Image (cartoon, rainbow, N blue to C red):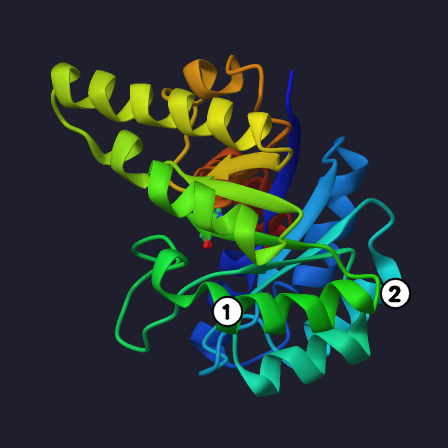
Amino acid sequence: MPRLSVNIDHIATIRQARKGSEPDPVAAGVLAELAGADGIIVHLREDRRHIQDRDLRLLRQTVRTKLNLEMAATGEMQRIALDVRPDIVTLVPEKREELTTEGGLEVFARVEVLKEYIGRLQNAGIPVSLFIDPDEQQISAAKKTGAAWVEIHTGAYANASIEKERNTEFGKIVESAKLAASLGLRVGAGHGLNYVNVKAVAGIREIEELNIGHSIISRAALAGMDRAVRDMIELVGS
Ligand code: PXP
């Protein structure tokens, strides 16, 4: 059974809607760990649209399991990672206009540049994972960069609306996981996984870890609605 790391970016998204102080992703990280999460993930974006530098620094002090920093391969982010020292860095592509990370990182065409970038982090004791599409060429290139991990992008599988397409995409994830493991890479997977589609991916033996955010935060909001309204009625009525 793979481990579960929880992406708490969307707790910060709700906070940033008012640019206030709640809900605090640091508190969400603590609660996720108390519920059994094996890791906490945050994506510090260049535009700081959700997670802020302050969140990352406090999470570094409070996370007891494994803090995974998702980031673009830029100079600014490398400096932050070397300073804050998360337990692992996941390199992701980043476009300002996107709603979420859309595709995997282009590794094949950038092996040398990434090798140097990753080397600087890993020499400082921070393992690096590359978020890539389930594609043989990208997996083999990931190995050449020296990265310790790959995270297989499950978005195409999760978004497939017809069964045939879903099966095809699932097959790519299985083959990619097998190839990565055979090359000595450690394997994670994530993006778009939810309470309906996660089971099949969780059954792939080579996948050690699943990284899930949106569906968990969505369920947390609805599962907590009853309690939150009752708490307010009690206050209003007293
Ligand atoms: N893995 C990576 C690299 C991501 O960028 C994201 C989204 O932030 C996830 C996993 C989680 O995806 P989701 O929020 O759809 O579960």
Image quadrant where one finds the N terminus = top right
Give the residue displayed 54% in from the left and 52% down from the top: 144
Note whether residue 228 is visible: yes
- Element type at mark 1: helix
User: Is 196 left, or right, of 181 in this rendering?
Assistant: left
Which residue in the structure is indicated by mark 2? 61
- Element type at mark 2: helix
| Residue count near mark 2 (Cα–Cα under 10 Å), binned few <14, some 14–19, many ≥20 | few
Give the residue displayed 69% in from the left and 67% down from the top: 119
Task: Give the Cα separation between the discs numbered 2 and 1.
Answer: 34 Å
Where is residue 47 shown, x and y percent of the image? 44, 83
Determine which of the numbered discs, if any, sits on residue 10 in the image: none
User: Is 86 left, or right, of 136 in this rendering?
Assistant: right
- Name the kind of residue labelled 2 in the image: Gln
Q: Nearer the viewer, mark 2 or mark 1?
A: 1
Where is residue 185 shown, x and y percent of the image? 62, 37
Note whether residue 72 is visible: no
Give the residue displayed 46% in from the left and 61% down from the top: 92
Where is residue 192 shown, x and y percent of the image? 37, 39
Which residue in the structure is indicated by mark 1? 112
Image height check: is 201 above or below 82? above
- Name the kind of residue labelled 1 in the image: Glu
First reached walking from the N terminus: tag 2 or tag 1: 2
Image height check: is 194 above or below 126? above
Badge count: 2
User: Is 58 left, or right, of 153 in this rendering?
Assistant: right
Closer-to-camera residue (213/140)? 140
User: Is 195 left, or right, of 135 in this rendering?
Assistant: right
Q: Residue 36: name its quadrant.
A: top right
Give the residue displayed 70% in from the left and 81% down from the top: 80
| Residue count near mark 1 (Cα–Cα under 10 Å), binned few <14, some 14–19, many ≥20 | some
